[in-house]
Amino acid sequence: MNHVETLWPLAAVLGEGALWNPADGCVWFVDIKNPTVHRWRWSDGARASWPMPERVGFVVPRTGGGFVLGLKSGLARWTPGSEPVPWLAVDADRPGNRLNDATTDPDGRLWFGSMDDAETDPTGRLWLLDPAGPSAIPQDGPYVVTNGPAVAPDGRTLYHTDTLGRTVWAFDLAAGGALSNRRVFARFGDGDGYPDGMATDAEGGLWVCHWGGGRITRFRPDGSRDRAIAIPAPQVTKCAFAGPDLDRLVVTTAAIGLDRAAHPQAGDLFRVDPGMRGWVPPPALARADPATA
């Protein structure tokens, strides 16, 4: 158990957004600061990459086909092999911001974060895309660096990360998408690094990646620590349950700021046996075509 395998020795500058897409049997992820969307196929390990015109924080399947991209300028629609189509500007009044990390809840609502690209000012927020209308609605903030988010498989709890604040927050999530009861779920100490991307398993446990901590920690639903898995790269950014049986974690990492001679696997894509199964958030509901400005 917990065997760690290198899937792609990519040396990504800022690998992020690991995601399993059952529709095509592939792992999708991004390199934010070398703007690229990457795909790794489960059946044979085939690799493909698509350069992006600007920094890209996430890639999420979209109902009806294609993907939603989180670009620096906002949300875009995208089909592999084509150029992204601008779809909804986000934080247009905050030009120093970019989008960072996303998930969907069991009803297909898209939750995502914005952050200060310079990582100094608290200008970021947690957002919800209105699936029925042309808007994205801020839900919480401010943050310097947003991360996560993740939703419990029963759809009743949403987790969100204040990375520089070293805090994972939990919210009650109502059936209609409203958040309430904001509370501290977990805090990271100096030896933990910083909390980054997250995933929930089928039992409701939360797996949190450690930026600067070289590991992933599973937290029980009550916030207590259950176990940790070491990753051979210090800056662990995102994990997702993947594979036909959803019994593996795929893990993105970042090489930015590191000496690759000292950390030769920094920025690579990994696969881990976590000893339990997860679930897959559904494609994003995105029926309307919002204005692009």
Image (cartoon, rainbow, N blue to C red):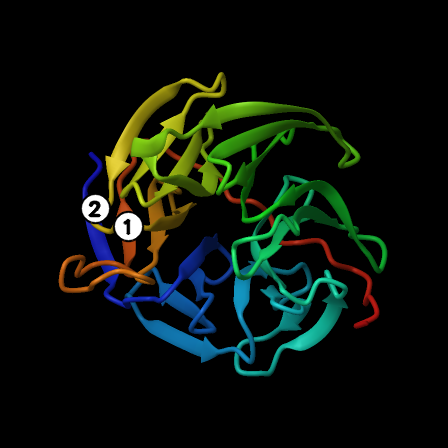
Percent x, y of residue 132: 84, 53
Secondary-structure class at tag 2: strand
The quarter of the picture where the C terminus appears is: bottom right
Residue underneath mark 1: 271
Q: Mark 1 to mark 2: distance in Å? A: 6 Å
Percent x, y of residue 263: 18, 57
Left/right of residue 9 with respect to residue 248 in the rendered view:
left
Left/right of residue 51 with respect to residue 140 in the rendered view:
left
Answer whether labels 1 and 2 touch (C-beta < 8 Å): yes
Secondary-structure class at tag 1: strand
Residue underneath mark 2: 4
Percent x, y of residue 41: 36, 65
Q: Which residue is located at x 60 percent, y 52 percent?
A: 121
User: What amino acid is at disc 1?
Assistant: Arg
Q: Nearer the viewer, residue 244 or 32?
A: 32
Residue at far bottom of view:
82
Which mark is first along the chain, 2 or 1?
A: 2
Q: Please, is residue 290 above or below residue 101 in the view?
A: below
Find residue 184 and report its image quarter: top right
The quarter of the picture where the N terminus appears is: top left
Q: Which residue is located at x 53 percent, y 82 percent?
A: 81
Percent x, y of residue 245: 38, 43
Few, some or many residues within 10 Å of mark 1 (<14, 14–19, 20+): many
Few, some or many residues within 10 Å of mark 2 (<14, 14–19, 20+): some
User: What amino acid is at disc 2?
Assistant: Val
